[in-house]
Amino acid sequence: MIVVLLGPPGAGKGTQCKRIIEKYKLAHLSSGDILRAERTAGSDLGKEAQGYMDAGDLVPDELIIKMMVAAINKADGGCVLDGFPRTVVQGSELDKALTAEKKKIDAIVSLEIADEVIEKRLTGRRSCPVCGAVYHLQSLKPKVEGFCDKCPDQELVQRADDKPEVVKNRLETYHAQTAAVIGYYASTGHEIFTVSADAEINDITADILSQLDKVTA
Ligand code: AMP
């Protein structure tokens, strides 16, 4: 099964993906996570992506498409795409690549949420650079302010692209380019399940899984 999870940055796609992959035993292919891993590894792709990412701009289509198609082809048992496609070109190139492999998208889920809620969520997000645990200044505080619960003495950090001015740019980029992906899928006959992402995490999961159960039934 191939699932596409759409939605603005900060809609909770990562959290929901973890639950989807657990239930259906799929690979979680987050384009943002793969790019961050490339940066940490110091690869050419990581170096090329760095400037775009820190500014909250999209990395050029050709780099992303190549990277994600390779990852999808590796994920034999199916996958959830998180953060990809983000432009109409990415969407149509993904369709072409899947058709060439005699595969198709089985479900598209679109998480919807207001910009103001996202701004609060993202600018308050802090994470541990060692284990990756994610906290929030208001809603998910660590036991000791500013430090990871799991890694002793490890200070939490804010992602460069979670800084307020960059979050604004990421949202503008989303509205300018990524929202059109929904239009692309609608115009090419793909069904889109819309789910409100401004709700309890477990309720959002239940909503998504009930839609995906219908696809797998
Ligand atoms: P994310 O963690 O999904 O918010 O992604 C972080 C950053 O990685 C984005 O702000 C972009 O700079 C870059 N990125 C991730 N996915 C894509 C994509 N599909 N197309 C272009 N850039 C991307």
Image (cartoon, grey):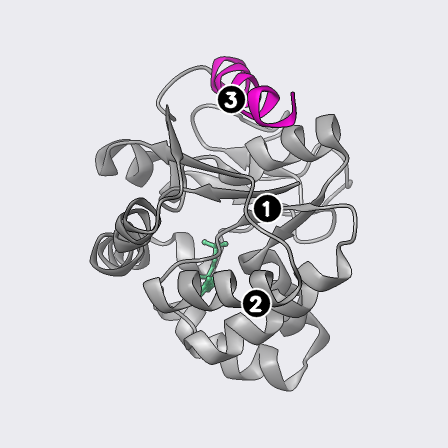
Who comes first in sequence, dot 2 or dot 3?
Answer: 2
Q: Which kind of residue does numbered mark 3 sit on? A: Gln
Element type where label 2 sits in the image: helix
Please identify the quarter of the rendering in which residue 215 is found.
Answer: top right
| Residue position marked by numbered label 1 in the rendering | 156
How far apart in space, not on screen, are marks 3 and 1 (Cα)?
36 Å
Q: CA distance from mark 1 to mark 2?
A: 39 Å
Near-viewer residue (149 or 210): 210
Pick whichever of labels 3 and 1 is earlier in the sequence.
1
| Residue 132 in sight here | yes
Mark 3 nearby-residue class (10 Å; few <14, some 14–19, many ≥20): some
* In magenta stretch: residue 205: yes
Dot 1 or dot 2: first in sequence order is 2
Residue that mark 2 sits on: 97
Q: Nearer the viewer, mark 2 or mark 3?
A: 2
Q: What secondary structure predominates along the stretch shown in magenta?
A: helix
* Residue 26 in the figure: left or right of residue 167: right
Query: Can residue 35 be seen in the rendering of this structure?
Result: no
Residue 177 placed where, x, y %?
Answer: 26, 60
The residue range painted magenta reads 201-217
Q: Say which quadrant the N terminus sits in.
A: top right
Q: Amino acid at mark 2?
A: Ala
Residue at 54% from the left image edge and 58% from the top image edge: 32
Front position in the image: 168 or 77: 77
**Mark 2 packing: few (<14 Cα in 10 Å), some, or many (20+)?**
some
Secondary structure beneath dot 3 equals: helix
Q: Quadrant of residue 47?
A: bottom right
Question: Which residue matches tag 3?
Answer: 211
Q: On screen, 10 above or below 103?
A: above
